[in-house]
Image (tube, helix red, strand yellow):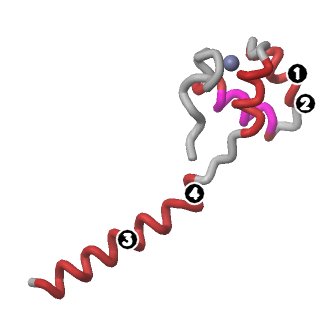
Amino acid sequence: MLIPVRCFTCGNLIADKYDDFQNKIKSGDEPDKVLDSLGVERYCCRRMLLTTVETIQQVIPFYEAIRRRNEEVQSELE
Ligand SMILES: [Zn+2]
């Protein structure tokens, strides 16, 4: 889903660096150099940024379908 706020292992704050990281990666920079420039040095924190997969856009349609179905059920009950 979303990036965890803190590193699971050491508790270092990482969520505030995620947007910068994603923007620089999309512009073509090397991930290791971007992590160095953001000051993420421990490998536990680096893996958090490197391995997070944003799935929110894939999940949202299911919540919308559930909401629509709930509205249909409510209108049938009324
Ligand atoms: Zn860490």
Whether 68 is drawn above or below 7: the answer is below
Give, as a three-letter code, the residue at label 4: Gln
- Mark 3 lies on a secondary structure that is helix
Give, as a three-letter code, the residue at label 1: Lys
Prevalent SS, magenta region: helix
The residue that label 3 is drawn on is 66
The residues bearing labels 2 and 3 have C-alpha atoms spaced at a distance of: 40 Å
Which badge, 3 or 4, comes first in the chain's sequence? 4
Q: Which residue appears at 75% of the width and 39% of the height?
A: 51
Q: Residues within 10 Å of mark 1 (few under 14, many from 20)?
A: few
The residue that label 2 is drawn on is 30
Q: Which residue appears at 88% of the width and 24% of the height?
A: 32
The quadrant where residue 45 appears? top right
Q: Are marks 4 and 2 in contact (CB under 8 Å)?
A: no
The quadrant where residue 76 appears? bottom left
Give, as a three-letter code, the residue at label 3: Ile
- Residue 60 percent coordinates (x, y): 49, 61
Nearest-to-viewer mark from 2 and 3: 3
The residues bearing labels 2 and 1 have C-alpha atoms spaced at a distance of: 6 Å
Q: Please tell me which residue lies in front, 30 or 4.
A: 4
Which badge, 4 or 1, comes first in the chain's sequence? 1
The residue that label 1 is drawn on is 33
